Amino acid sequence: MRKRSDKMITVLAGGTGSVKIVRGLASQRSDVHVISNVGDNYWLYGLYICPDIDIIIYGLSDLLDQDKGWGLKKDTFGFLRQMEIFGEETWFRIGDRDTATHLTRTNMLKNGKSLSDITKWMCEKFAIETKIIPVSDHSIETRLITDKGEMHLQEYWVKYRGKDTVKGIEYMGSDKARPNPEALNSIHDASLVVIAPGNPLTSIGPMIQLKGVRKELIKNKRKVVAVSPIVGDKALSGPAGKYMEAAGLEVSAYGIAKLYADICSHIVIDTKDRMQTKKIEALGMHVHETSIKMTNKKSEDALASYLLNHIH
Ligand code: FO1
């Protein structure tokens, strides 16, 4: 029989809020599987853009623009400038080299390849050992219902700069989308399943909304750990707090625990939130307190080691 430590580590991840823990785990283990959100994927100029998959690929190959949290470092924007001259909207800033990723992916899709196969091929091209598995090869689109109407997540957050009031969130297509069998196997076979500290509603939400994924997580709940993306009443990055409020959730580690209580049995919260531990334990979860802010490689590795050594 294989020892628990011989089995792989699986991470459910979005993009900007998740890449740091994925990088920390991958720097210590060669057998990390990342199940990636696809709800952020966006069609632009006929190109299929998969921000969460690309952020993880670029992050693991040390090519990610760390300041922005997306795109390739030192990329240029000549293509976008030309689109502007042609009178196109250019609010979504895809760089020149980044565009090669989107163009190649789109051509491969048009030639009948699945998003999973394309992602596998991309990982090989970027020499990444970590396996990245799109949660589904079918379309799931995260749409925000705002006081200005309903729109794609990228339009809400990037085009309109997240200004409008959010009334609700929808995962269009999630009722028909089939989970990727490889994603389900990666949950089943792992020794530890980590829910990354990504946005719970837009990065993790579209994945755990899929019936098959939720069912597999519930079955394997004893080995599933979530890392809180909230410290105090603020998100570590991005609009998670705003979306949680819109969904009627308390913006706190407790709010995160409540949201994930049926799919995981462990949660890692920041030591600053230790006064919430008892309340979270009452939900039936094991609470682990440590520093969850990842500001450099040392803190990414430290949190990854904590997960690998403390969650049993
Ligand atoms: N985020 C922005 O805030 N502005 C952009 O212009 C932008 C462009 C972009 C291009 C490619 C890509 O893969 C991601 C990009 N993002 C941009 C990030 C993206 O909107 C989100 O942060 C992710 O979807 C969340 O994980």
Image (cartoon, rainbow, N blue to C red):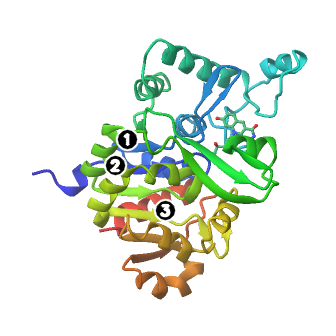
Residue at (67% x, 74% y) in the render: 233
Horizontally, is 26 left or right of 84 in the view? left
Badge 3 crowding class, 10 Å Cα cut-off, few under 14, some 14 to 19, many 20 or more, is many
Depth check, front residue: 220 or 1: 220
Mark 1 or mark 2, which is nearer the start of the sequence?
Answer: 1
Comparing labels 2 and 3, the label whose residue is closer to the camera: 2
In this view, the residue farthest toward the left is: 1
Q: CA distance from mark 2 to mark 1?
A: 6 Å
CB of mark 2 within 8 Å of CB of mark 1? yes
* Residue tagged 1: 179
Q: CA distance from mark 2 to mark 3?
A: 29 Å
Mark 3 or mark 2, which is nearer the start of the sequence?
Answer: 2
Q: Position of residue 308 (x, y in %)?
A: 36, 60
* Residue tagged 3: 303
Label 1: which secondary element = loop
Q: Position of residue 1 (x, y in %)?
A: 9, 51
Q: Position of residue 245 (x, y in %)?
A: 67, 68
Can residue 293 be seen? yes
* Residue tagged 2: 212
Name the kind of residue labelled 2 in the image: Gly
Q: CA distance from mark 1 to mark 3?
A: 29 Å
